[in-house]
Amino acid sequence: MKSNAEAYWKANVSLIVKLLIIWFVVPFLGGIVFVDTLNAISLGGYPLGFWIAQQGSIYLFVVLIFYYAKKMSDLDDQFGGGE
């Protein structure tokens, strides 16, 4: 039982770390590092680099929340902790 709980926790922490890395890297690269290149593209009348820095990171966060909820449901089913 203890090893099952440890495996569940390890999978949970691994998922969280991966999603936090994605949440940091996408806005950092799109809104800071490659902003000049991306600003050549327009999205809704705004430069893409600006849009990623201002709105894209928020939309990405919402998508990651839903993805996390789905993956945690799958982990619960896998480890027998589901409803």
Image (spheres, grey):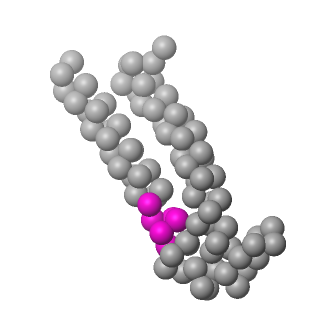
Q: Give the extent of the magenta segment.
A: 24-29
Residue 63, horizontal then vertical, whole percent: 60, 47
In the rendered view, would you say 45 is above or below 10? below
Q: Residue furthest right?
A: 45
Image height check: is 48 above or below 54?
below
Q: Main secondary structure of the magenta part?
A: helix
In this rendering, position of residue 4 left or right of residue 44: left
Q: Residue at x 45, y 24 (%)?
A: 77
**Is residue 60 among the parts visible in the rendering?**
yes
Would residue 60 appear left or right of 14 to someone viewing this image? right
Q: Where is residue 16 drawn, in percent x and y?
A: 38, 44
Quarter containing the N terminus: top left
Q: Residue furthest left?
A: 2
Is residue 61 inside the magenta stretch? no
Front-most of 49 and 2? 49
Can you give x and y, in whole percent of width and height, for residue 21 in the image?
40, 57
Q: Residue 75: where, in percent of width, then height?
A: 42, 31
Residue at 19% over, 27% down:
3
Left or right: residue 62 compared with residue 48: left
- In the picture, residue 48 is in which quadrant? bottom right
Q: At 55% from the left edge and 72% from the top edge, which residue is drawn? A: 30
| Number of numbered labels in the structure image | 0
Look at 22% across and 30% down and name the residue there.
Answer: 6
Looking at the image, residue 3 lies above or below residue 15:
above
The magenta stretch spans residue 28: yes
